[in-house]
Amino acid sequence: MIQRGIATFGLDYGKCPRWLFERMVALGRQMTLAIAGEEGPDEYIRRLSDPVWFQSLGTVLAFDWNASGLTTILTAALKEAIRGQERDLGIFICGGKGKTSLKTPDEIKLWSERISLAQENSKALVYNSKMAAKVDSALVQDGFQIYHHSFFFTKNGAWTVIQQGMNTANQTARRYHWHSKNVKDLVCEPHSGISSQIKLESMLDLTAQSSTKNRQTSKDLVSSGSFNTLMKDLLLLSKYWTPFSQTAQIKDTSGQQRLKFLNLENKEFSWHPVVNENFAKSKYLQKILWKLCDKKPENYEKLLASEGVGPKTIRALSLVAEVLYGAKPSYQDPARYSFAHGGKDGTPYPVDRETYDKTIETMKKYVDKARLPFPEKQRSQKLLDAKMTHSVIPSEVPPWRDEIEGSRG
């Protein structure tokens, strides 16, 4: 079963040699034909939503197993590998890194027109792509800035999102996977199985099941209350409270005592900017909150989907919901498992041999089925054997870095 979580990698700089990228495209084409031919297009993109499987495919194609560039280069290679064969395969890959990610909606619409996909289905795909990006930037506030967004879909309507964020402070990248079959609710634990090398001590995760009350209260603040009342709450919060305060009582504008529900360890707000009058009096924030109070979204998903709503708006509502109304969100990092099924030395946990072996053996099967020259098959098998031993690329394979033309993973 695919597990939930987030994958974290080192943030690398540099370029991928043209010869290596061309080789990855050629290998990727054969692997895609073999897998999609046997399993079908829907199963192919479902497998891409499994971070271990995705990472293993990158290993077969000879890229660094733990480099941030694996995400961007592998996605670009697969996109190029199926170019001209999208209709025959029934697989479509949109988006990519940086400015290319902004073209995702237009690419989805273009392919939808070419395959005569119903307009409502095309709109749904675009909406899911945009919401995945919003969720991972506004609801999962972990300090990673999203810079890569790819949307895979099939003519049957199945879809997968693979996006990656960077944290320049600690030089790491974090990857987020989604799959349509796993998404029961776009704002409540929507991610499919991903892994992580590290876990953050504290971050705001409004996608957690335990954040349900906070999401509901945030929605009620704009849909059931008034703009004036909400602004009074924000100004009250900014006047009497800072992230490192643990006083039990604060006063509102009428002088009456209001219970402050916050009872946290200081570290849980260490990532949060100080809430001051400038924060509450931000003209842009007030404009967005006024629009929300006027629009009165019927649920939290529609609140998030509203134009202009981003991390600051979500954080402001979440903070008021917690501090003044006792609706605490989750501050636990959703990352659960370390990349590559653990380590043979037991760090950060023992190897999950059953899952590990199954992944590798499955990948080997597709290498055998791919129409590859015998030396290429031998090389790919060697890479997989090395990954099974200790998740390390053999020493004769150069540690190639990130993008073809770009400067950062």
Image (tube, rainbow, N blue to C red):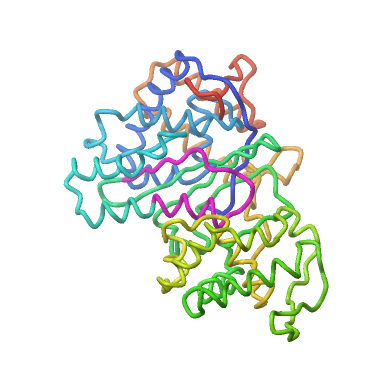
Relative depth, front residue between 118 and 238: 238
**In magenta segment, residue 139:** yes
Relative depth, front residue between 238 and 37: 238
Residue furthest to the bottom in view is 256
Q: What x and y, as percent, mark residue 4?
A: 56, 54
Q: What x and y, as percent, mark residue 405?
A: 47, 20
Q: Image height check: is 88 above or below 153?
A: above
Taking the spot 75% from the left edge, 84% from the top edge, the residue there is 257
Q: Image height check: is 240 above or below 191?
A: below
Q: Quadrant of the C terminus?
A: top right
Q: Is residue 10 left or right of residue 59?
A: right
Q: What x and y, as percent, mark residue 142?
A: 63, 50
- Magenta segment boundaries in residue numbering: 129-153
**Total count of labels:** 0
Q: Is residue 264 left or right of residue 358?
A: right
Taking the spot 31% from the left edge, 56% from the top edge, the residue there is 124
Residue furthest to the left in view is 116
Q: What x and y, as percent, mark residue 365?
A: 43, 33
Relative depth, front residue between 341 and 138: 138
**In magenta segment, residue 388:** no
Relative depth, front residue between 242 and 61: 242
Taking the spot 60% from the left edge, 46% from the top edge, the residue there is 195
Residue 232 found in image quarter = bottom right
